[in-house]
Image: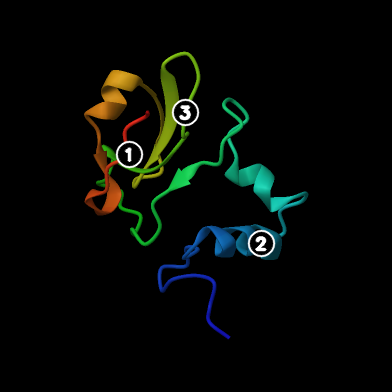
Amino acid sequence: MRPITSSTGHPRTRRNSKRFFGESGASGDPEQYLRSPRDNQPYVIIYGSPLDSDGRDIILAYEKDGLDGKRYVITLSRDVKLMTDEEFAGAKFASGLKPSKKK
């Protein structure tokens, strides 16, 4: 059986994240931890990037739509920030990925 986490101990995929929450003792449906209560959309997570205390400005995960022109993000350094759409558009993302433009 393939491990659900990478060598750094972090889940490799969304499916593994759900399993990870269950195995870590989190209560309830794991999906509740992977969905924003503000926009009711799944969080967008960039898998495969190691956490880094120097990565304060590099986004690892974010709310898909956010609310009122702002969205929460989490950085590689595990800091949670509320960003405006303008700040988000100019942000750096883990693995050099950029979110697709809203249509």
Read off the residue under disc 2: 24
Which amino acid type is marked by label 2? Ser
Return the x and y of residue 71 as percentages of the image width and height: 44, 25
What residue appears at the point 68 percent right and 52 percent down from the top-left corner?
30
| Visual colour scheme | rainbow
Query: Would residue 3 be found to the left or right of residue 23 on screen?
Result: left
Q: Give the label, 2 or 1, closer to the camera.
A: 1
The quadrant in which the N terminus is found is: bottom right
Between the residue at mark 2 and the residue at mark 1, the CA separation in whole angstroms equals: 32 Å
Q: Name which of mark 2 and mark 3 comes first in the sequence.
A: 2
Residue with the most extreme right position: 28
Return the x and y of residue 33 as percentages of the image width and height: 63, 44
Return the residue nearer the eye: 10 or 40.
Answer: 40
The quadrant in which the C terminus is found is: top left
What residue appears at the point 40 percent right and 58 percent down from the top-left corner?
47
Which amino acid type is marked by label 3? Asp
Residue with the most extreme front position: 103
Read off the residue under disc 1: 100
In the image, residue 18 sits, relative to residue 32, either above or below, namely below
Mark 2 in CB contact with mark 1 (< 8 angstroms): no
Q: Name which of mark 1 and mark 3 comes first in the sequence.
A: 3
Mark 2 neighbour density, 10 Å: few (under 14) some (14–19) many (20 or more): few
Return the residue nearer the eye: 38 or 80.
Answer: 38
